[in-house]
């Protein structure tokens, strides 16, 4: 008997419906197409030599590091790596206990585990709009619904936040630095307000920060985690704070290693670890030992400088290209770091409709709708500037400029 699989799947799979956008993006794998669509780091900044040396050292030490690397490991992560992260720059001021830090298989797993431990069918999550589509994808499977707060050049707008918090979201999800997809950074004033309001209403904040270390200009701002700790110290409260902080080695070492980390109150980490045991027992031992061996003497902090240099040049090239080739009706953000910028077309245009024309002209982007939980933002798109080299960026933006010029002239791509 041949099984009708569709009748067998759990209800949850309906929330997991494969994103049309991800399907669309498969087209961009054609090497002729200049893709600004993916969120890929530049392979030119992968630390090949350091990883090769660490790997060969580890694997030769059969009785010590080699055995640890090829063996099952603890679900909360490789202890030396967790200890190293405790004094990593974003956390130096926090006095973290090792129980506050766990290792996950990329931040994406942390997002999924958060969904697993916090989200019941119909729970509302407060997000910026637009927001990271991978979080929506993870949480849709648990039946999440979304309260959206618009953002501008200074990040999540605060005027609607208080009202939204009154409706009791499970948690707030925020990307304060060089946000994916817009590239904007949450201002200090708004960070403080966010932490105060979350505290007033007793709502946890999930701070997702893969890009904070990749600042090209301006001053680092305190993390939401830091501001929340300061607030609790001032108030003399006994808890470990309201913020769950996520970050990753994907953009500072290698995404293929699949290593992320969570900084959270110990009791939240215990729940995450229980959920993780059901998912994958633990994160790859060998990847964790390599990351520790590569990072233990401060290599990552030095390496980040190279990444910043390479990406800031690529961002500059993209911004110059946009100035040069885009019709005057088109607007874009000017990020101070990270991997992405955000383009806005005139309001009556639809970036999804224009996408096939861009592909025909051998250039790709991600249409903005995918980052909006309620499917709006039709006239927007995300461009990645980290992956392509400057010459390719200039060529790709010139192609995109022509596509938009034509589209605006003809205005055939109307939403209605
Ligand atoms: C905001 C954000 N969170 C999480 C992730 C997932 O990162 P990873 O699973 O590679 O650590 C990404 C990847 O691009 C991201 O942009």
Image (cartoon, rainbow, N blue to C red):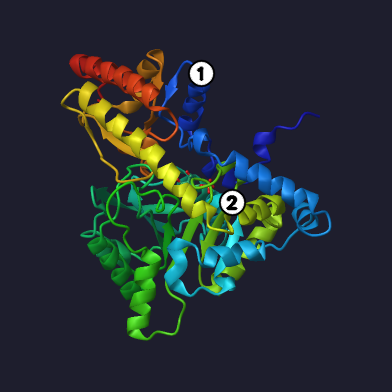
Vertical order, 6 against 351 (above or below): below
Where residue 354 appears, as percent x and y from the top left, is 33, 21
Quarter of the figure with residue 209: bottom left
Indicate the quadrant containing the C terminus: top left, top right, bottom left or bottom right. Answer: top left
Looking at the image, which residue is at 57% across and 50% down? 106
Residue ranking furthest to the left: 328
For the residue carrying disc 1, how many other residues have a C-alpha within 10 Å: few (<14), some (14-19), or many (20+)?
Answer: few
Residue 133 sits in quarter? top left
Q: Are marks 1 and 2 in contact (CB under 8 Å)?
A: no
User: Which structural element holds mark 2?
Assistant: loop
301 lies above or below 7: below
- Residue that label 2 marks: 259
**Numbered circle sitting on residue 31:** 1
Is residue 143 among what the camera can see? no
Establish whether ligand 1 lies closer than 8 Å to the Cβ of label 2. Answer: yes
User: Which residue is depicted at the point 25% across and 17% down?
Assistant: 407
- Label 1 – label 2 distance at C-alpha: 28 Å
Front residue of 95 and 152: 95
Total number of numbered discs in the rendering: 2
Left or right: residue 379 compared with residue 251? left
State which tag comes first along the sequence, 1 or 2: 1
Residue 149 in sight in this render = yes
Marker disc for residue 251: none
Q: At x 48% / y 54%, what residue is drawn?
A: 301
Q: Quadrant of residue 324?
A: top left
């Amino acid at each position: 008997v041949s099984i009708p699989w569709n009748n067998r799947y759990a209800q949850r799979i309906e929330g997991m419906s494969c994103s049309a956008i991800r399907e669309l993006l498969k087209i961009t794998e054609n090497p002729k197409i200049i893709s600004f669509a993916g969120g890929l780091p530049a392979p030119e900044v992968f630390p090949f030599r350091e990883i090769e040396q660490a790997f060969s050292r580890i694997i030769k030490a059969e009785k010590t590091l080699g055995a640890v690397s090829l063996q099952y490991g603890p679900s909360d992560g490789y202890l030396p790596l967790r200890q190293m992260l405790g004094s990593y720059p974003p956390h130096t001021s926090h006095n973290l206990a090792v129980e506050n830090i766990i290792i996950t298989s990329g931040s994406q797993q942390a997002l999924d585990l958060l969904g697993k431990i916090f989200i019941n069918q119909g729970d509302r999550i407060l997000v910026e709009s637009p927001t990271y589509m991978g979080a929506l994808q993870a949480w849709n499977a648990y039946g999440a619904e979304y309260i959206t707060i618009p953002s501008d050049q200074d990040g999540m707008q605060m005027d609607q936040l208080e009202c939204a918090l009154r409706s009791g979201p499970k948690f707030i999800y925020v990307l304060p630095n060089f946000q994916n997809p817009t590239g904007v950074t949450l201002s200090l004033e708004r960070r403080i307000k966010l932490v105060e309001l979350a505290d007033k209403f007793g709502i946890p904040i999930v701070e997702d920060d893969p890009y904070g270390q990749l600042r090209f200009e301006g001053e680092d701002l305190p993390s939401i985690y830091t501001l929340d700790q300061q607030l609790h110290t001032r108030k003399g409260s006994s808890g470990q704070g309201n913020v769950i902080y996520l970050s990753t080695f994907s953009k500072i070492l290698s995404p293929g290693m699949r290593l992320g980390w969570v900084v959270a109150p110990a009791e939240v980490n215990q729940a995450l670890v229980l959920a993780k045991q059901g998912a994958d027992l633990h994160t790859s031992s060998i990847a964790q030992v390599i990351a520790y061996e590569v990072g233990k003497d401060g290599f990552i902090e030095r390496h980040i400088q190279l990444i910043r240099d390479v990406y800031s040049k690529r961002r500059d090239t993209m911004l110059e290209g946009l100035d040069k080739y885009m019709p005057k009706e088109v607007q874009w953000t000017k990020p101070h770091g990270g991997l992405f910028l955000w383009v806005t077309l005139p309001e009556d245009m639809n970036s999804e409709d224009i996408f096939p024309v861009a592909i025909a002209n051998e250039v790709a982007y991600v249409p903005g709708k995918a980052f909006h939980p309620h499917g709006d933002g039709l006239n927007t798109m995300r461009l990645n500037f980290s992956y392509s080299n400057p010459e390719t960026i200039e060529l790709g933006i010139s192609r995109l400029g022509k596509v938009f010029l034509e589209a605006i002239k003809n205005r055939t791509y109307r939403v209605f």
